[in-house]
Image (cartoon, rainbow, N blue to C red):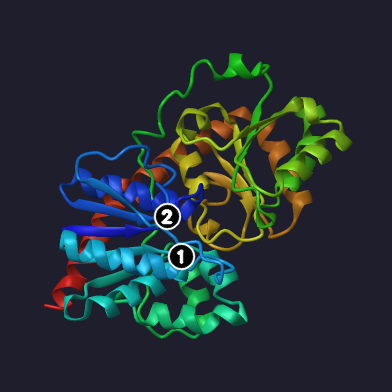
Amino acid sequence: MKIGITCYPSAGGSGVVATELGHALAEKGHEVHFISYSRPFRLETEGTGIVFHKVKTVTYPLFKYPPYSLALAVRMAEVVRREKLDLLHVHYAIPHATSAFLANQILGEDRVKVVTTLHGTDITLVGSEESFFEITKFSIERSDAVTAVSRFLARETREKLRVEKRIDVIPNFVNPRVFSGAGDENLRDRLDLDEGPVLMHISNFRKVKNVRDVVRLLARVREATGAQLLLIGDGPERVPCRILAEELGVHDRIHFLGNRIAVHRILPFADLLLLPSTVESFGLVALEAMASGVPVVGYDGGGLPEVVRNGVDGALAPLGDLERMIEMTRELLQNPARRREMSKAAKGRAAADFSTEKITAEYEALYLRVIREGA
């Protein structure tokens, strides 16, 4: 098959999943064309079966903001027509599913099938805004197939947007071979980490991720456990976290590592991954941690309980209960044997239920179904 993939290229779960899916499809012999305003975060270079098509936006005095969705629609139509694509797979409803609809209007009789994958905030935040509600609902319902990364997100879409269209749940995935390595052997020396346990948090540092709570948690458990913290990612909450760390006197126990592509080289050094998000539609970073043998401590809300089994391969506190999360973290840091049990269970869970091979096959089956329905 010839597949066009559009995603946000920044360091976020939807872009990571879309890029890794493209790699997996190319490895299976499909031809994959990425269409976006810049090269996706994990698409470092083009390889066999993968081509990147850049969308060029126009700056014009009458445009307060460049009309990216229109430029994207035109580029999609160009690539579909020139490369003879079989379908477009867009990640995120707004604006990608909308642009795909417009591209098909341009293509007319040459239109292709559109698969839209919903990842979370396109529904829970953007899609629920009054100014985007109608276009989000319209774009989803005009897609030939719709997938959501969790049962939670599928329910949210039906309830918040009153969508009656079939939504297939295809979860995010991880390559167990990539995330089961030993990691960067020089990392501990480079960061001057001591022998104390390592807590880790990876995110886009937006408010919904509650990164400041991670700093507060460290301040509460460090004396009893000797814990240190690695913060990976960047965003609006990074500076407030630095200020809070200074105020709480834990700045010397925290390493801000910024955005990293090769998180699989860092995750094996963690004893626990902390994920106190207000809502996670799935929690891709939790799955990557589990594949690395790192138990996850987070909140029992959103789609995270579909990934992390409380008490088996991680610990989930009631949503918003930071005190309970602190208590769980302290207990696990002081019980290495329990952590080892959870680590083994986590790796097994990731490999058995969320492997790249298994989930890619589900997408391939969906593509074939959609194409045959239109034949």
Q: Earlier in the sequence, mark 2 or mark 1?
A: 2
- Dot 2 lies on which element? loop
Helix, strand or loop status at disc 1: helix
Query: Which picture quadrant has residue 301?
Result: bottom right
* Residue at the (52%, 64%) spot, across then down: 120
Seen from the viewer's position, the closer of residues 118 and 237 is 237
Give 168 or 91, whichever is nearer the viewer.
91
Mark 2 in CB contact with mark 1 (< 8 angstroms): yes
Q: Which residue is mark 1?
A: 68
Amino acid of disc 1: Tyr
64 sits left or right of 268 in the view: right
Q: Quadrant of the C terminus?
A: bottom left
Quarter location, residue 105: bottom left
Q: Amino acid at mark 2?
A: Tyr
Q: How many numbered marks are there?
A: 2
Taking the view exactly as shown, the residue that stands out farthest to the front is 61
Q: Is residue 34 above or below residue 161?
A: above
Residue 92 % position (x, y) = 44, 65
Q: Is residue 198 above or below residue 154?
A: above
The residue to which callout 2 is attached is 37
